Image: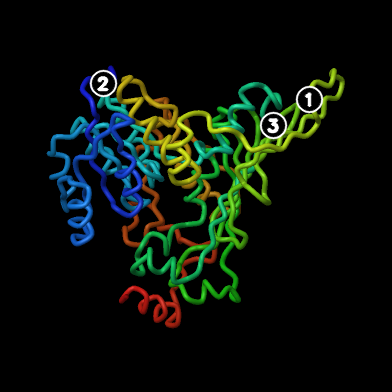
Amino acid sequence: MPTKTIRHQPIRIGVLGLRRGLTYARGASEALGLKLVALCDVQTDRLQALGRELGVATYEDYDRMLEHDLDAVVLANYFHQHAPFAIKALRAGKHVMSETAACFTMAEGVALVEAVEQSGCIYQFAENYPYMLQNLELSRRFRQGAVGEFVYGEAEYVHPGPADFWNEISPGVDHWRNWLPSTYYCTHTLAALMHITRTLPVKVNAFSLPYRADDPVFARRPVRNDACSMITVRMDNGGVCKLLQYFLRGHGNFVRVHGSRGLLENLRTGDPRMVRLVREQYHERPTTPVEQIYLPDWPREHAVAATAGHSGGDYFVNQHFASAIRAGRQPWLDVYRGVAMSLVGIQGWRSVLADSAPFEIPDFRKKAVRDRYRDDHWNPDPTVPAAAGETKPPCSLLGDIKPTKAQLAHARKIWRQ
């Protein structure tokens, strides 16, 4: 189906979810050809206050917002609930930019892909880590051939914090952050490597690491999941990626790419925006130093991008979405790549529960492949009953964890505040 284009300027957008979504709302600038016209959230007081501040319409009901005179929606609602909202918007003829994850079950992934294909609308996966300054530079140098063909990559998204911070943004025992299996939040790591190497995942083995009893943060949070995961991913060129994500000590984001002729990475210490290129020129006439360490220039729009969140990533996500709509051409972070990244988390959890056995990452660009998974509703969400014929997967490698009285008591003090 031909992609629907927007001829008028600016592109009118509505935003669902005003914690993370506020970044996109404020970034919907005239310079990008975007205009914020509507907000939607269930927290009435905050919604009304932001509506007055930004001078836009407000809705507590998503269906009502879709009836507003708008061209596109940004979905920044809960991690595990994006696909149904995206499908509803696509069927209403709205372009969609969706936060992570793109889908939470295999069946949702099938339905989302087919909704995009049938709608003729733009779908962009709002993964901002590929567009951080250092990762843009790693991608640029890789495409120049600086390190040859992709062999092996590593990416880390390590994001610890004090218990009261997590309790504040995770109100309630059933909040997704308190039960999400450790492999699911894998797109920050995988997206950067996919963007740099232009490869796709085809197989996954995963390992989950439960919280340790002496962790003082764990003692104050009512969690039913594990602390972190390590995922190995075979890519479609034969290369391998190692992904490490979430609650370990030692906050940081790190990307490393080994090629057949050299190494690219950002620095672990000092300024993480700095890039290191190593190229031992064996059997070649030396043309550059073996090692280069430097702070890259912003590729474009330096002043405005430098003020955006996630080291410029939030600016470029908005920019690419607007550009794709105006061009009538799907962005690089399209529905197929967004779903593929999300399937790594789903299949990775299956791997964890199968003693880290390998599981395929199916190619949902092919209908025959989608047909094998369109009724696969395997879902670890403890608030959702198991589908007919399915076994309910636990959210921890250790099984069905029950929060302790001490964990609940501490968290409830924060929730009441």
As shown in the figure, which amino acid type bears the numbered disc 1?
Thr
Label 2, secondary structure: give it. Answer: loop
Q: CA distance from mark 2 to mark 1?
A: 46 Å
- Nearer the observer, 389 or 73: 73
The local secondary structure at tag 3 comes to strand
- The answer to which of marks 2 and 1 sits earlier in the sequence is 2
Q: Which residue is mark 3?
A: 151
Q: Which label sits in the foreground, 2 or 1?
A: 1
172 left or right of 396 in image: left
Query: Is residue 186 depicted above or below 160 in this figure?
Result: above
The crowding category of the residue bearing disc 2, from other C-alpha atoms within 10 Å (few below 14, some 14 to 19, many at least 20), is some
Dot 2 or dot 3, earlier in sequence: 2
Q: Which residue ends up furthest to the right in the rendered image?
A: 283
Report, in whole angstroms, how far the alpha carbon at label 2 lies from the one at label 3: 39 Å
Measuring from the top left, give residue 414's x and y in whole percent. 37, 75
The numbered disc on residue 288 is 1
Residue 410 position within the rendered picture, expressed as x and y whole percent measured from the top left: 42, 79
Tell me which corner region of the image, top left, top right, bottom left or bottom right, holds residue 85: top left
Position of residue 267 in the picture relative to residue 279 (left or right): left
Q: How is the image coloured?
A: rainbow
Query: Which labelled disc corresponds to residue 5?
Result: 2
Residue 386: % across, % down: 34, 56
Q: Is residue 163 above or below residue 198?
A: below
Type of the residue with mark 3: Val
Q: Residue at x 22, y 47 (%)?
A: 54
Residue positioned 82% across, 25% down in the render: 281
- Classify the position of the N terminus by image quarter: top left
